[in-house]
């Protein structure tokens, strides 16, 4: 009797463990089955590198959105990475204990603020600010970059901080023993040792920035053309989907799913490099 | 204390580079904390005055823009998603830590797929949910479709935190239990799992935070009907989706601020709860 129960539960546990595998397989199947035929109908080259997205005229080129995603993500990294890493260094090596506790919970709060709230904040604060300072309509590459930079800060900070903390204390002490100041010791011995972990944090932040949807949509302007300058509006892969999914039909709808396929492949590449980095760090 | 500070300044005088490095990290910390504080204080200052009783009316109309139905739906959505994700996540983690042999291929595969799942952007989940739960399984735009989509989204989080918590339980506990004649199943449920409860709880609170903040994954799975869902097949907008909808209409800017306040308060409460759990159990 007991033996029977043991065996049954083992199967239940095994089945539960396989749920995540099944989920990934299902997501792949449903995206590819619905998206790939449309891509081949439009033509792979014309879909990926076509510069005109005009569903009304049956023009489905997502190149502006690919460029848009790259611009906005690069901008977010430019804005977020330096501040994020330096903040992590401060937390790990400079911070008084009382402040550390406050910062730790602030960073996790920052990570927990919903993207609509960030988006709304961007809409009512950043957009007017950018419009008045730099001209243009305010909804722009620049606005989206700054907002995303803010949103990926907690990811970069917490991952970097953990990897800086993991560097053996003897590295730091070695630096001091050679006569380096506290700052030099941290920057020239501890930080290089934490390099791959910090890089993993940056890549993780990059994944967040590529995948962010609602906040970007609220501040980016969403014109489906390649932006000519920083104050021009931009549309990303994610916002392309969410903007038009509600009313699209037939090929248009499938082209949007095709957009998701491209986005999914981007994310898979980022994930792959991330797990490679993680393995490297373990070695 | 005072003389130490003076000494430090004297050191910086001879070593401007160290001073530069220190200023950089200090500045970064200030930027991070100011940005977070600015977002929160701005939303609170602008939103709190608009927290009128009208906003909490039982029924949503275009005049009162009540957030009450959305708040109720958020609770339902959270409960339902957790109902799916928590048992599966815990069972999967039990299999991975207690049953699977070390270096098992399946364990590696589950780990990889869970990592992939946690990197997929929410809009891709939303699209998958729309294709699979809404259309293929025929659940329609409903609480159920939304909750199933979200439960896949938070599954890796619950699995990982539970796995970590289970691994932290010392082997001597298990050996003691086996020594007293308990079977594997009894050992897992009576000895190991109770020890891991705090870790599991912190994972669950993080999951709740993600559910509450999610919007992109819900637009095309749970829909935007602003009424409390009566059955699980009813379309239901959660608080985040509600905030997004009313911010887009441009007419309800004051109500949007107020809704943002409510969302922020919920998120802050969830964070405080997880901090409290962490402090209480892991010292």
Image: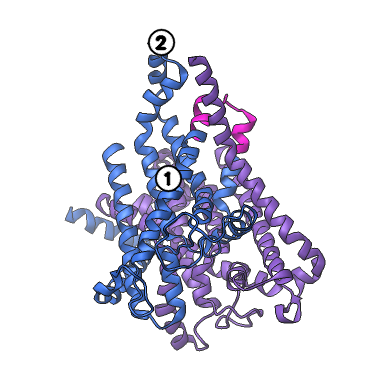
Chain colours: A purple, B blue
Q: Residue at x 29, y 70 (%)?
A: B57
Q: Is residue B107 located in the magenta-colored stretch of the structure?
A: yes
Q: Which mark is residue B201?
A: none
Q: Position of residue A180 (x, y in %)?
A: 40, 50
Q: Is residue B174 visible?
A: yes
Q: Which mark is residue A175?
A: 1
CA separation in Å, label 1 and label 2: 55 Å
Q: Is there one chain holding both mark 1 and mark 2? A: no
Range of the magenta residues? B93-110
The 10 Å Cα crowd at callout 2, few under 14, some 14 to 19, many 20 or more, is few
Q: Is residue B261 located in the magenta-colored stretch of the structure?
A: no
- Please state if B65 lies on the left or on the right of A139 as rendered: left
Q: Position of residue B196 (x, y in %)?
A: 38, 32
> Dot 2 lies on which element?
loop
> Dot 1 lies on which element?
helix
The 10 Å Cα crowd at callout 1, few under 14, some 14 to 19, many 20 or more, is many
Q: Residue at x 54, y 59 (%)?
A: B122
Q: Quadrant of residue B172?
A: top left
Q: Position of residue A129 (x, y in %)?
A: 42, 83
Quadrant where the image shows the C terminus of chain B: top left
Label 2, on which residue? B181
Foreground pick, A193 / A250? A250
Subunit ID for the residue under disc 2? B
Single out the residue that lies furthest toward the left. Answer: B2
Subunit ID for the residue under disc 1? A
Foreground pick, B140 / B23? B140
């Amino acid at each position: 009797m007991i033996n029977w129960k043991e065996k049954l539960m083992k199967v239940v546990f095994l089945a539960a463990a396989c749920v995540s595998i099944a989920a990934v397989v299902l997501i792949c199947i449903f995206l590819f089955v619905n998206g790939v035929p449309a891509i081949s109908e439009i033509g792979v080259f014309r879909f990926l590198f076509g510069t005109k997205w005009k569903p009304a005229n049956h023009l489905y080129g997502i190149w502006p959105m690919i460029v848009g995603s790259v611009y906005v993500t690069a901008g977010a990294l430019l804005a977020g990475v330096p501040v994020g890493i330096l903040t992590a260094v401060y937390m790990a090596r400079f911070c008084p204990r009382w402040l550390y506790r406050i910062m730790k919970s602030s960073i996790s709060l920052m990570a927990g603020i919903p993207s609509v709230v960030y988006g709304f904040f961007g809409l009512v604060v950043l957009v007017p600010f950018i419009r008045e300072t730099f001209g243009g309509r305010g909804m722009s590459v620049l606005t989206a970059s700054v907002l995303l930079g803010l949103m990926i800060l907690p990811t970069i900070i917490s991952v970097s901080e953990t990897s800086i903390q993991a560097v053996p204390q003897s590295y730091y002490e070695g630096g001091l023993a050679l006569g380096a100041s506290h700052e030099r010791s941290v920057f020239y011995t501890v930080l290089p040792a934490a390099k791959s972990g910090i890089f993993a944090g940056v890549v993780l932040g990059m994944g967040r920035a590529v995948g962010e949807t609602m906040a970007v949509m609220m501040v980016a302007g969403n014109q489906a053309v390649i932006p000519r300058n920083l104050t021009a509006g931009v549309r990303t892969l994610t916002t392309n989907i969410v903007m038009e999914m509600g009313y699209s039909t037939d090929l248009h709808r499938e082209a949007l799913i095709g957009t998701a396929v491209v986005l999914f492949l981007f994310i898979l590449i980022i994930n792959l490099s991330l797990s490679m980095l993680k393995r490297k760090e373990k070695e | 204390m005072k003389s130490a500070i003076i000494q430090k300044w004297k050191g910086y005088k001879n070593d401007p580079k160290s001073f530069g490095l220190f200023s950089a990290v200090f500045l970064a910390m200030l930027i991070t904390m100011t940005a977070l504080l600015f977002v929160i204080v701005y939303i609170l200052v602008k939103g709190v005055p608009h927290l009128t009783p009208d906003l909490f009316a039982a029924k949503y109309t275009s005049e009162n823009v009540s957030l009450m139905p959305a708040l109720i739906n958020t609770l339902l959505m959270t409960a339902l998603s957790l109902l799916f994700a928590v048992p599966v996540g815990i069972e999967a983690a039990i299999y991975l830590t207690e049953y699977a042999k070390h270096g098992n291929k399946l364990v590696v595969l589950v780990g990889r797929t869970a990592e992939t799942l946690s990197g997929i952007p929410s809009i891709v989940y939303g699209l998958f949910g729309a294709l699979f739960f809404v259309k293929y399984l025929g659940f329609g735009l409903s609480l159920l479709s939304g909750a199933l989509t979200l439960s896949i989204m938070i599954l890796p989080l619950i699995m990982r935190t539970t796995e970590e918590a289970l691994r932290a339980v010392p082997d001597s506990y298990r050996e003691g239990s086996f020594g007293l004649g308990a079977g594997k199943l009894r050992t897992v449920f009576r000895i190991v799992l109770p020890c891991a409860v705090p870790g599991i709880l912190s994972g669950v609170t993080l999951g709740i935070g993600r559910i509450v903040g999610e919007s992109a994954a819900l637009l095309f799975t749970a829909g935007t009907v602003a009424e409390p869902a009566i059955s699980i097949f009813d379309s239901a907008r959660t608080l985040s989706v509600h905030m997004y909808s009313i911010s887009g209409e441009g007419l309800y800017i004051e109500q949007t601020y107020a809704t943002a306040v409510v969302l922020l308060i919920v998120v802050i409460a969830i964070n405080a709860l997880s901090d409290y759990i962490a402090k209480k159990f892991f010292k």
